[in-house]
Image: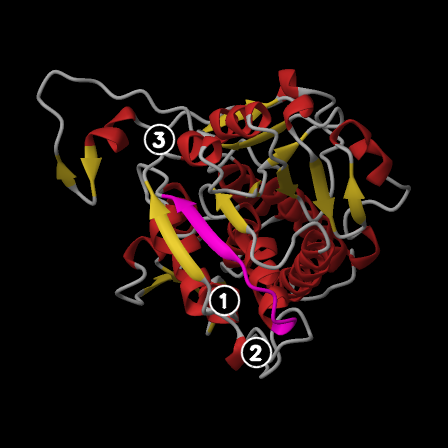
């Protein structure tokens, strides 16, 4: 089965040709002739290269090695990866569950990946029960989730734009994924001028390579700074708001995001500036507070190299927790597809309808 690609974007509103690469079908992960095609974001912005994954293990390695980044983008790649496990001749439901377990271990902090895989497992069980092709069913569901998440992201962006003023300068950290890019798209559509400052985000430079590229591609004045400059710029009155995504939002309003977010949130609070969190799908019911959040620890060697070249002296070790926790009192608002919430009231987002449960 071939995943459906149309001229309309995943959001159902913008044409595919209008969208920056990272919002397009091909800018994420796609199902292509029985393989998963993933844009290698490590090579951006100067080279658009794709890898083809033939097994779920290859998808898992691609996620671990940062070929694809962003909580929701990696969840789509994982969904298609699970379909690869299902199309193997003689694959049992146990084999598919084992593949899901492996894929879940690739990025433990964000829960979007686990949620998508759990939905795909339910779809797989139903497919077996009803004598349907399991891989096709997982692909269909993953396509649907990708479209649903894109629509959520655009709605979140529309709410976020109501908090901003024409001419505002925004600081962002890491790559805030689709809600951030849709924020730029919606601002451009409404002729709202924004200035974008992107912290470089060591060691993979997502701010330099991805966040800045999307903003510049859409015509906004865009600047890159080192990860240590944000507080000083806030104090000097050069920034109007700090805005990021979040890999985890706890029910008490604590958030986990790329390491470095906490120090910027502190600086924003000290300088009476708002810190807005884009979290299109609301809080994670699994995490009452930050005590249960798993902080992924990546190899310290990542900090001793830059794009494959070592620059630290021999004998020096790296220490690299990927994420940090920002408490709710430092978060001005959490912006979702259902509206804008005070951080300590984000649990009000929840209702009886679970994440995409009607699509199983």
Eye-nearest disc, 2 or 3: 3
Image position of 205 (left or right of 98)? left
Please, what secondary structure does the residue beneath circle 1 have? Answer: strand
Tell how many labels: 3
- The residue labelled by disc 1 is 30
| Label 2, label 1: how far apart the Cα atoms are | 9 Å
Residue 176 seen in the figure: no
Figure quadrant of the C terminus: bottom right
User: Where is residue 238 drawn, in percent x and y?
Assistant: 46, 42
Residue 351 seen in the figure: yes
User: Where is residue 232 drawn, in percent x and y?
Assistant: 40, 31
Residue nearest the viewer, comparing 109 with 104: 109
Image position of 229 (left or right of 69)? left
Reply yes or no: does residue 146 show up in magenta: no
Residue nearest the viewer, comparing 228 with 49: 228
- The residue labelled by disc 3 is 228
The tag earlier along the polypeptide, 1 or 3, is 1
Q: Quadrant of residue 278?
A: top right
Residue nearest the viewer, comparing 95 with 45: 45
Which mark identifies residue 5? 2
Circle 2/circle 1 CB separation < 8 Å: yes
User: Where is residue 163 drawn, in percent x and y?
Assistant: 70, 49
Give the magenta part as a residue range.
189-199
What residue lies at 89% left-to-right and 41% top-to-bottom?
A: 351
| Label 2, label 3: how far apart the Cα atoms are | 41 Å
In the rendered image of this protein, does residue 191 appear above or below residue 311?
below
What residue lies at 69% left-to-right and 49% top-to-bottom?
A: 280
Instruction: Assess disc 1: are there few (<14), some (14-19) or many (≥20) residues with their C-alpha within 10 Å of its C-alpha.
Output: many
What residue lies at 66% left-to-right and 66% top-to-bottom?
A: 140
Please, what secondary structure does the residue beneath circle 2 have? Answer: loop
């Amino acid at each position: 089965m071939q995943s459906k690609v149309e001229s309309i974007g995943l959001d159902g509103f913008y044409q595919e040709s209008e969208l920056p690469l990272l919002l397009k079908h091909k800018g994420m992960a796609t199902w292509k002739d029985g393989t998963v095609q993933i844009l290698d974001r490590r090579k951006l912005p100067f080279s658009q290269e794709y890898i083809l994954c033939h097994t779920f293990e290859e998808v898992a390695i691609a996620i671990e090695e940062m070929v694809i980044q962003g909580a929701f983008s990696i969840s789509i790649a994982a969904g298609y990866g699970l379909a690869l496990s299902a199309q193997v001749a003689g694959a049992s439901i146990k084999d598919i569950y084992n593949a899901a377990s492996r894929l879940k271990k690739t990025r433990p902090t964000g829960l979007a990946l686990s949620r998508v895989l759990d939905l795909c497992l339910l779809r797989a069980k139903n497919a077996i029960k009803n004598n349907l092709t399991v891989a096709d069913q997982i692909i269909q569901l993953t396509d649907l989730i990708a479209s649903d998440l894109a629509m959520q992201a655009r709605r979140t962006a529309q709410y976020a734009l109501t908090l901003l003023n024409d001419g505002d300068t925004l600081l962002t950290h890491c790559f805030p994924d689709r809600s951030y890019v849709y924020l730029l798209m919606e601002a451009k559509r409404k002729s709202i001028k924004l200035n974008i400052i992107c912290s470089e985000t060591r060691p993979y430079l997502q701010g330099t390579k991805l966040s800045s590229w999307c903003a510049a591609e859409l015509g906004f004045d865009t600047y890159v700074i080192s990860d240590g400059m944000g507080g000083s710029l806030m104090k000097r009155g050069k920034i109007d708001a700090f805005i990021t995504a979040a890999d985890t939002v706890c029910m008490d309003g604590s958030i986990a995001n790329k390491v470095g977010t906490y120090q910027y949130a502190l600086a924003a609070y000290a300088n009476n500036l708002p810190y807005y969190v884009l979290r299109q799908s609301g809080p994670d019911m699994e995490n009452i507070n930050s005590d249960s959040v798993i902080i992924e620890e990546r190899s310290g060697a990542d900090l001793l190299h830059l794009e494959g070249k070592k620059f630290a002296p021999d004998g020096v070790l790296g220490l690299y927790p990927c994420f940090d926790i920002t408490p709710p009192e430092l978060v001005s608002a959490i912006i979702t597809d259902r509206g804008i919430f005070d951080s300590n009231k984000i649990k009000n987002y929840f209702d009886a309808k679970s994440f995409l449960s009607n699509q199983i």
